[in-house]
Amino acid sequence: MSPLCVLFIGLVLVVGMIVFLRMNAFLALLAGALVVSFLAGGVPDNENLWVAKVTRVTEAMGTMAGKIGVLIVMGALIGHCLTASGAADKIVRSVLGLFGPKRMTEALLSGGFLLAIPVFYDASFYLLLPLAKSVYRMEGKHYIRYLLAIGFGCTLAHTLVPPTPGPLMVAGEMGISIGMMMLLGAMVGLGTLPFALLIARWIDSYLPHPEIVDRDQLRETETVSAPASMPLWVALLPILLPVLLISSASICNVLTQNHTLVWTDSTRFFEKLILLAGNAEVALSLGALLAAWTLKQARHLTLRELETHLTAGISTAGMIILITSAGGAFGAMLRVCGVGEQIKTFVASGGSFSGIGILLVAFGVAAMIKTAQGSSTTAMITTAGIFSAMALSAETLGFHPGYLAVVTGVGSCVTGWMNDSGFCIFSQMSGIRETDALKTWTVGLALMGLAGLCVTMVLSQCLPLV
């Protein structure tokens, strides 16, 4: 069977099972991987054909789980501990204090982006929502603007910057280093934030007074406040330390490869130490230890109480690991069936259909899958599986392949509607009608995704990093 036919069957199966059968994304991706594996060849003649086709799916799942399992668990621990200790609240309120009351929209947007890097989208939205509600009760206006600012900031970090699961898995699937994914994701995210601010203001201007379904929704949502004695640097350290360590290792690697930095026998120990500490698993583990220590000190917990919190944080990572592992297996089976070579041949025959054209196609595929089944992470996983099979290099694209990884993130922002948990959180937690959420959140995400695409294309040409 033609590899492109196998790709089509796999996509229809995965999307159809999620959208129409309401099946869990893990089961849908696993079924898709198995079907693609059975339709593809590549099994040695001396093996049991059917058993081997099942085994290679489970082996691919194990490989992906090994790549991202520790990272996701440690990221979940950091987020849970920051929330439970009040450090997240400290960070948010410090950002608000930095911008001042007149720049509440900018503060909520920046706070959402910063907070959602270690804390998942829904938890970040819950943390910031009480601030938006408080300001709205005092001012009586701009409620939609504040809600969109929070949602846009959280969404950009959630889809672009590791250690959130989507970008983390895409980086592993496409062979992009975690440090480079952090750098490019942060660059595109920060470049898109000004457009997100303009979009939030514009949408608020044509729907200034949304209908509130339940006025009780404007009550304060429970949140954990930071102890008065907690310095800001203590709250930020579990986030900043992994970023600094991973970035230092990436810089060290680049300088060493370019012979700008030459190590001698007496300094080789420091090179090994920098690379060890900058390993993504080690760096995030150190961040998780710091976050756990901050929680214990801030809440004066016993070791038993701390263990309860850590268990709760770890439990949130289990389903995410399963989904990303199944998505990795789906992508691996697409590579086995030869879809990458087929697409590469098509791209090469198109002449000018390269570089920017591939970014546009990847954006469109991610947006289509997100619109169909609602999950940004699943959209990123599926798109990465397709394009990683092409093994596109910087020479082929004309810029670093990391931009291709990033564009799947901005594509997965489009479009959030009723099948998206983020849409439900935005609508239900804020107390506005679903029709108003469609006019604001859905339209806003589509525009922000397009803005992110433009930022990515401009950066890929101005800063190709080849």
Image (spheres, grey):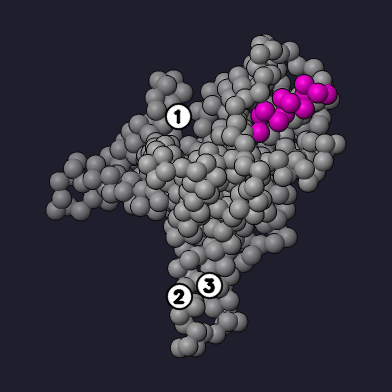
Q: Confirm whether residue 31 shows in the render.
A: yes
> Distance of mark 2 from mark 1, alpha carbons?
45 Å
Which residue was labeled with disc 3? 253
Which residue was labeled with disc 2? 272
Mark 1 residue type: Val
Q: Secondary structure at mark 1?
A: helix
Question: Viewer-proximal residue, 334 or 218?
Answer: 218
**In the displayed structure image, the side of residue 279 where residue 396 appears, left or right:** right
Residue neighbourhood size for the residue with mark 3, other residues' Cα within 10 Å, grouped as few (<14), some (14–19), many (≥20): some
Residue neighbourhood size for the residue with mark 1, other residues' Cα within 10 Å, grouped as few (<14), some (14–19), many (≥20): many
Q: Is residue 165 magenta?
A: no
Mark 3 residue type: Asn
Residue neighbourhood size for the residue with mark 2, other residues' Cα within 10 Å, grouped as few (<14), some (14–19), many (≥20): few
- Counting residues from the start of the chain, the first of labels 2 and 1 encountered is 1
Residues at circles 2 and 1 in contact by the CB criterion of under 8 Å: no
- Counting residues from the start of the chain, the first of labels 2 and 3 encountered is 3
Which residue was labeled with disc 1? 15
Residue visible at 38% across and 31% down?
28
Quadrant where the N terminus is found in the figure = top left
